[in-house]
Image (cartoon, rainbow, N blue to C red):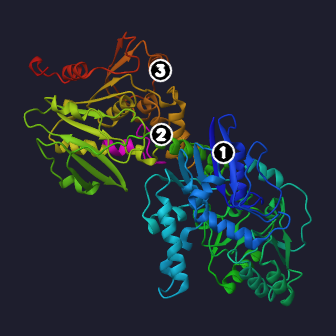
Amino acid sequence: MKKLLFITWSVSYGYGTEKSLADVLNRMDKEQYEIHILPLFQYAKTTIFDSSIKILDPLIDYTAENFDEKTALENYYRLLGSPLEFNRRIPDSYDCVIACNHNAPSYLASYLKCGAKVLWIRGDMQELNYQQFPEDTPQYRQTKQEYEMQANVLKSFDAIAVISDVVQQTLAELFGITDNVFKISNSVNREKINLLSQETVELPEQKLFTTLGRLDYNKNQMLLLKAAAKVKEQRDDFMIYLLGDGEERENLTQYIEAHGLTQHVKILGFIDNPYPYIKNSVATVLTSLSEGFSLALVESVMLHTPIISTDVGVAKELIDKYDCGSLIPYDEDALASVLIQYLNQYDGYRESFSIGEEYDWKTETEKTVALIKTAMAAKEQNTKIKKLPYPEVTIHDYELDTYQIEREQMYVLRVIKDRVPYEFLIHRRNENDKLIVFHNGAIPGGDVKVPVFQRHSWAKQLKTSAVFCMDPTIYLNGFLQLGWGIGKNENHYLKNSCKILKKIIAKMGIALEDTVIYGTSAGGFLSLMSGIFLRGAKVVADNAQLDARNWIYKEALDSIISFAFDNISDALRYPEQFSVPDAFEKHGYVPKIYLHVNLCSRADNTAQLVPFLKRAENLRDIGEYNDIEVILHYEPEKGHDGLSMDDAISFLYRVLALPESNF
C-alpha cells in the first residue's frame, strides 16, 4: 500500500476545488492508497471527505476555542520559512506528497523529505506576473518576491498537473515549464448532481440568475450587483441568488439595500445543494477577476444551464467547445445588456449541451492516479536516459521536400510537424541499396526526455542502410514506457511518422520493396502498423503485441489512454490504432509479414497470436493481401525476449534476399 499526503488550503467547504478534490480522493482505491490530508486552514468542523481519509491537524484552526489569530499567523509564517521545523511537524514518511495548489501548499510540499512530489496547480498563476505592475511600486516588489519563491520550488516536483489550458499556458509563459506537465480538469460527478438537482426548493416567481462562490474581492460579485441595478431600470421580472459566504457579505448587503435591490437580489449564504437553483436558472453568472478553473461553470453546463462569465479559468474553453454561453468584459453596462438579452430570450425551453467526459470525476480520478504513479515511477528510476552521441539536424515537415539525406554518417533527423518532434537515427550506406527500419520496444523506467533508439549499435554490424525510429507518444508523460504510436487525441503519431519516413526513404534513394521493418514486443506492433502505411515494405515482428488491448500489462494500456486522450471514451473511436487486424481492415491492406512467436511465452502466444489468427480468418474488405508467415519457437529460457542480434540480422538479410557473403 502506498502512503500519500495531500496538502491543500482547506477541507471545510463543499464548493469549487475542495469539492472536486473530495470527489477524486473519496473514489481512490483505499486498499492501494493510504490517504492523509494536511489542510492549511480549518474554517468549520465539517468535512466532505470519507472517514477512511485521515485529516491532519490544520496549521491554522479558526474553530479552536480561545483562537488567537495573531499567534496563529505568526506560527504559520514561521513554518513557511522553516523547512526543518515543518518536517518535524510532519513525522510520517510518504511515498508521494501532492501539493494541491501553487503558493503555500507547494512551498510546504517542497520542504518534505519523501519519495516523490507532485504539484497540482488548481488556481490562476497570473497573480505572480510581477511585470503587470510599475517597477517602483510595492506591488511589483512583493509580487516579484513571490514569483521568485515559486520559481525556486517548482524544480522540486517530479510531475506537474494543471486544471485548464489557461493555467498550462501561464506556466509556460511565466516559468518556461513545459516538460512533464499535463492537464487534469477539475471534475464533476455528473450522476450525483443530476440527482441532487431534482430536489424541491423554493424558487422565485421571477426569472432566476445564480452565482456561486465565496463572497470576496476576487469573485467580484459587486460587478453583478451594479449590473442588476441597471437591469432594474428596464425590467422587474428577474431575481439573482448569491450562493456563498465570505468577508464581502456585509458590503454586498449594504449595496443591495442602498440601491433598492432587495426584491431582485438575495444572498442565501452557503447552500449544501446548489444544483436545483442552477438547474432552474436562466443562466449561471461568474464575475471573477481570476480563476484557475471554476467548477461551477462546468456544473452549470452539465445541468444544461447557460453560463455568463468573465474570461477566466475554463469559461472560454467551455463556450468555444459547447456554445453554451457568453463571455463578458469587466463592465457593468455590458453585463446588464447580456442579462437583459438572456431575459428576453428565455421562454423556459432548455437547450442541451453535450459536455465531454474530460470534466467527469471518473476521468479526473483515473488521471490523478496515473499522475501519482508517474511521479513515483520517475523517482524510483534513478538512472536517467542519456542523450546518444550523434549529431542532430532539426527541420520542419515542409522543408523535407528539399532536404538532402547525408551519407556514411549516423545522425538524428528531427522533423517537426504540428509541434510534434518525429525523430529518426539515419545511417545511409553508399554501397548497399537495402534498408532495415527499426522500432523501439518498451523503454524501462520511462521519464524519457531525449530520443531513444534501441539497437542503434547494430548499425555498425549491418551491411545495409538503417533507420531507427522514435515514438513521440512517449514524450506525453514521464510515466509512459511505451506508446504504440497512438499520439494525442485524433493526431495519430505513427501515421504521421510513416508519412515522414516514406519521404526519407525516397530521399535515401531506396525502394520500399527493398525495405524491411523490424521490431520486438511494442516495437513489433509499431513495425506491423508501419508496414500498412509503407506499402511494399516487408515486416519482421518478434513476439509482437498484435492487439494492444490484450496486452497482459493493463496498466500500460490504461496509461496510454489516460495521457493520449482528453476524453477517455474517444479511444473507442480508433480501434485501428490499437489492433493490427482492425488496422488491416481499416486500410484494406496486409503487408508481407514474418511473425516470430515463442510458444513458451503465454503473453505472446495465448494473449496475442491465438486471438490474432482467429481474427485473421475473418478479415473483411482487404484489397491487397500478402502472405503472413508465422515462425514458432520453443525456447523456455527466453520467454518474451526476442531473437539475438546475430539471429535477427541473419533473418533480416534473408528477407532482403542479400547474398550469403553478407551474412
Residue at 44% across, 60% down: 177
Quadrant placement of the C terminus: top left
Q: Residues within 10 Å of mark 3 (few under 14, many from 20)?
A: many
Distance from Cα at disc 3 to Cα at disc 1? 29 Å
Mark 3, mark 2: which one is toward the viewer?
2
466 shown above or below 286: above
Distance from Cα at disc 2 to Cα at disc 1? 27 Å
Quadrant placement of the N terminus: top right
Magenta range is 481-498
- What is the secondary structure assignment of the residue under circle 2? helix
Q: Which sits in the foreground, 473 or 616?
A: 473
Q: Choose the circle earlier in sequence order: 3 or 2.
A: 2
Q: Position of residue 545 (x, y in %)?
A: 43, 27
Q: Which residue is mark 2?
A: 380
Q: Which residue is mark 3?
A: 603
Residue type of the residue flagged with mark 2: Glu
Q: Is residue 524 left or right of residue 311?
A: left
Q: Residues within 10 Å of mark 1 (few under 14, many from 20)?
A: many
Q: Choose the circle earlier in sequence order: 3 or 1.
A: 1
Residue at 43% across, 54% down: 179
Distance from Cα at disc 3 to Cα at disc 2? 26 Å
- What is the secondary structure assignment of the residue under circle 3? loop
Query: Is residue 359 in sight in this rendering?
Result: no
Mark 2, mark 1: which one is toward the viewer?
2
